[in-house]
Image: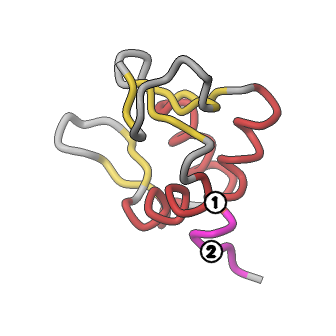
């Protein structure tokens, strides 16, 4: 059975739940290797990135429980000290 964007999003959440965080670059390469190149693309900076459709599914799956740490370029579990919203600095 073919993998779906929801499968990839669930894998991302599982990774965060097992280690509390997931770095963007590591995640992109892991997604490519485990699920295939149709879930990643090369962005304008020449870096491997996760497809928007996967990120949208991930956002829906983790709304309120996971934040994006912009400076670290990683997703992590929300902490009590975090500001409202998805993106943290």
Vertical placement of 76 versus 38: above or below?
above
Please state the horizontal and vertical placement of residue 36, each as a whole percent of the image.
58, 61
Residue bearing the label numbered 1: 8
Question: Residue 8, located in which quarter of the rendered image?
Answer: bottom right
Please state the horizontal and vertical placement of residue 58, each as a whole percent of the image.
55, 57
Vertical placement of 53 versus 49: above or below?
below
Residue bearing the label numbered 2: 4
Question: Residue 70, located in which quarter of the rendered image?
Answer: top left
Vertical placement of 74 versus 39: above or below?
above
Please state the horizontal and vertical placement of residue 52, each as a whole percent of the image.
37, 60
Give the magenta-colored segment's residue range: 2-7
Q: Residues within 10 Å of mark 2 (few under 14, many from 20)?
A: some
Q: In the image, what residue occupies the spot 69% across and 47% down?
A: 13
Relative to 40, is 16 on the left or the right? right
Please state the horizontal and vertical placement of residue 21, each as a whole percent of the image.
64, 27
- Quadrant placement of the N terminus: bottom right
Question: Residue 46, located in which quarter of the rendered image?
Answer: top left
Q: In the image, what residue occupies the spot 40% across and 59% down?
A: 51
Foreground pick, 49 / 66: 66
Q: In the image, what residue occupies the spot 45% across and 33% down?
A: 68
């Amino acid at each position: 059975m073919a993998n779906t964007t929801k499968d990839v999003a669930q894998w991302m959440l599982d990774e965060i739940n097992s280690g509390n965080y997931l770095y963007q670059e590591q995640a992109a390469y892991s997604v490519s290797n485990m699920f295939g190149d149709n879930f990643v693309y090369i962005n304008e900076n020449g870096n491997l990135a996760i497809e928007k459709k996967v990120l949208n599914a991930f956002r829906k799956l983790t709304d309120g429980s996971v934040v994006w740490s912009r400076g670290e370029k990683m997703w992590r579990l929300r902490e009590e000290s975090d500001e409202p919203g998805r993106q943290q600095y």
